[in-house]
């Protein structure tokens, strides 16, 4: 089984690397699952496309920036659609300024893949759209881990 680790990057502290690293280790150790970690994958794309200064392009060369980000978007859409079994999403205030997390949740839902959402906002502030696309909603990672263990523990190799 393979999980997509969705959540804010562009406007998140550490691009969301910390929670993704922890979940990757937990999923591997406890369930034998692998992950698609967009933080690591985007670092690889930066190297592959020589885009080390892509954040500067957002101000200095919008077309170059858009072209590079389009590569990232296309790759993420393909992976959510065709290579993942389920999606884990951290939903917090840092997703508001971006769009990728919204899209990833919607695409996973549209493809019939489970979406496990960790909501860090007051329920009143959680989008109805995102709620409707979520298979299950949790307030913390511990509750998610219990659910995943119950759901997938027999899959462990």
Image (cartoon, rainbow, N blue to C red):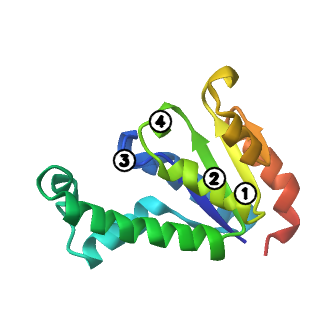
**Label 2 to label 4, Cα distance in Å?**
14 Å
Residue 62: % across, % down: 20, 57
According to the image, label 3 marks what residue? 10
- Looking at the rendered structure, the number of numbered marks drawn on it comes to 4
* Circles 3, 2 touching at the beta carbon (< 8 Å): no
State the residue lying farthest toward the front. Answer: 63
Identify whether 13 is placed above or below 78.
Answer: above
Q: Quadrant of the C terminus?
A: bottom right
Query: Residue at point 72% right, 49% down?
Result: 116
**Label 1 to label 4, Cα distance in Å?**
19 Å
Left or right of 145 on screen, residue 54 = left
* Circles 3, 4 touching at the beta carbon (< 8 Å): no
* Circles 3, 1 touching at the beta carbon (< 8 Å): no
* Circles 1, 4 touching at the beta carbon (< 8 Å): no
N-term mark: 3 or 2: 3
The tag on residue 48 is none
Q: Nearer the viewer, residue 37 or 153?
A: 37
According to the image, label 1 marks what residue? 109
According to the image, label 2 marks what residue? 105
Q: Nearer the viewer, mark 3 or mark 4?
A: 4
N-term mark: 2 or 4: 4
N-term mark: 1 or 4: 4
Q: Nearer the viewer, mark 3 or mark 1?
A: 1
Residue 24: % across, % down: 58, 59
**Label 3 to label 4, Cα distance in Å?**
11 Å
């Amino acid at each position: 089984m393979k999980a997509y680790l969705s959540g804010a990057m562009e406007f998140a502290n550490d691009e969301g690397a910390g929670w993704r690293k922890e979940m990757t280790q937990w999923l591997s150790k406890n369930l034998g699952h692998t992950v698609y970690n967009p933080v690591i994958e985007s670092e690889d794309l930066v190297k592959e496309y020589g885009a080390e200064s892509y954040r500067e392009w957002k101000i200095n060369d919008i077309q170059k920036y858009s072209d590079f980000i389009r590569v990232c978007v296309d790759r993420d859409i393909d992976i959510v659609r065709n290579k993942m079994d389920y999606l884990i999403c951290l939903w917090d205030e840092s997703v508001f300024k971006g769009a990728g997390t919204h899209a990833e949740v919607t695409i996973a839902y549209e493809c019939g893949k489970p979406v496990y959402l960790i909501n860090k906002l007051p329920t009143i502030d959680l989008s109805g759209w995102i709620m409707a696309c979520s298979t299950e909603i949790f307030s913390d990672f511990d509750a998610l881990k219990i659910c995943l263990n119950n759901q997938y523990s027999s899959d462990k190799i």
